[in-house]
Amino acid sequence: MKTQAPPKHSKILILDFGSQYTQVIGRRIRELQVYSEIVRFDTSADTIAREQPNGIILSGGPASVYENGAPQIDPKIFSLGIPVLGICYGLMQMAHHLGGQVRYTGRREYGAGTLDVTNESQLFDGLGAQVDVWNSHGDEVTALPSGFRVAARTSGSPFAAVEDPQRRLYGLQFHPEVAHTPRGREILQNFVYHICHCTMDWTMGSFIDDACERVRAQVGDNKVVLGLSGGVDSSVVAALLHKAIGDQLTCIFVNNGLLRAREEEVVQRVFGENFHIKLKYVDASERFLNNLRGIVEPEEKRKVIGNEFIKVFEDAIVDLAKPDHGSPSNNHQFKFLAQGTLYPDVIESIAIGGNPAHVIKSHHNVGGLPEKMHFELVEPVRQLFKDEVRQAGLQLGLPKEIVYRQPFPGPGLAVRILGEVTPERLRILRDADTIVQSEMEASDWYYRVWQSFAVLLPVQTVGVMGDQRTYDYTIALRIVESQDGMTADWVRLPYELLARISNRIVNEVKGVNRVVLDISTKPPSTIEWE
């Protein structure tokens, strides 16, 4: 089956030199409805020329350009005729390779500053004579390359913004992408629209249409299988693939016995009854709970659950591959496995900037299907950030309860029960967590936080109920706000709401007589307890 290639859209390439803000730059460009893509700092000029981007942004970074081993750009990039904007370290790269001078002057600039615009630069069109900005640098440019001129300065930096309009090269000492530069969006807008001449063609509707075309071209007439968890990512992938290839898609939903209350009902109703997607439901709860018996160490729990998931998934695919009369048939084989890989996963996997993160614990999502299954991967949302995935879900008609549901770990409630996972402990935690969710939704707080859930502690304490002494479990409440899960702070919920949650759990959940609130941040703590 031959399909036309998706149309070419405007594109900004971002070369990542290891800045903590690189993903923020990418998101800011996409908020302007222009497609952005993050690539390694050492991507060659030839490769970039083939990509034909409308513009290039060089990110910040922690290194000093004059040090041995510092990440360096291919200087031919400056001769491609493509507009370039260097931000902080990106500016230093520009000056360093084009004949300017960069050094550490002893004058560090961190935090808020005021930018004095000194000429009619296109970058600052419509912003006036002074702009509040956010600085974060120790090195600075002390001599400009030939052809460059000053566009703006701060009290601490005479070269806070520089440009060579003839070659369309621009550099900023400050960070326009962060919220602390209030009019930074307008600076990026001027670069993207007026200097790079991008059009606003990155919309969720256009992405969905392009993604469907790509999936049809990749898959042809073959069958695709997807492990559906009920979470946002796999749900959006299911809806997108169903739009693209219809009944060529089959979803497998595995009940591992570690799900939230009524999870299996919601998934089957939304995808089976509403979307009419082929859905195989596998109740493997007994298998998982038997394998978890006696295990208390968190990483071992995760491995047991992950390994069992693979076995259950394999068994389900073998079963699906059998025609009605019993033996396997090539007409029923699945060639493709769909996954909900997101753009931040892609960025991290290629270790941009050469700073791979330490493994704190196994990833929350259960995956890692064995090579012997010989699947080709379909990853239709690998270009999207999390907020864009939610936008796609709404555009595809998924209900709000799916699209805006809070993150849930792949190992499920097993990593919210400290110690051994037993049917009784699962019952206690599930009942307590149901109360947390219902009260958060009723008070309109559920969609205002990143995550809100209950944790069952292996701690029993003395209590009094009526005239009787109790010796029951403790529930911890974990309610956090976050942008991306990398950092988090505990949410200051109204005392009345906390009191209502606590009273209901103690009075309605048999086996609990105490509720505590986790008020730790990430870091040093993690969001999940295991």
Image (cartoon, rainbow, N blue to C red):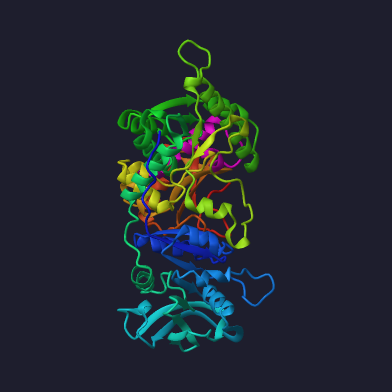
Q: Who's the residue at 50% across and 24% down the image?
A: 333
Where in the figure is residue 74, as x and y percent of width and height?
58, 68
Which residue is at the far right? 68
Q: Who's the residue at 52% across and 51% down the image?
A: 346
Query: Residue 419: within the magenta?
Result: yes
Q: Main secondary structure of the magenta part?
A: helix
Where in the figure is residue 279, as x and y percent of width and height?
41, 27
Is 490 left, or right, of 198 in this rendering?
Answer: right
Is 9 left, or right, of 366 in this rendering?
Answer: left
**Above or below 243: residue 481:** below
- The one of 253 and 332 positioned closer to us in this rendering: 332
- The one of 436 and 84 positioned closer to us in this rendering: 84
Q: Who's the residue at 47% across and 20% down the image?
A: 331
Q: Quadrant of residue 28?
A: bottom left
Q: Who's the residue at 35% across and 78% down the image?
A: 122
Do we see residue 144 in this rendering?
Answer: yes
Where in the figure is residue 404, as x and y percent of width and height?
37, 47
Task: Say which quadrant the N terminus sits in.
Answer: top left
Q: Which residues are magenta?
A: 412-440
- The one of 491 and 503 positioned closer to us in this rendering: 491
**Above or below 133: residue 221:** above
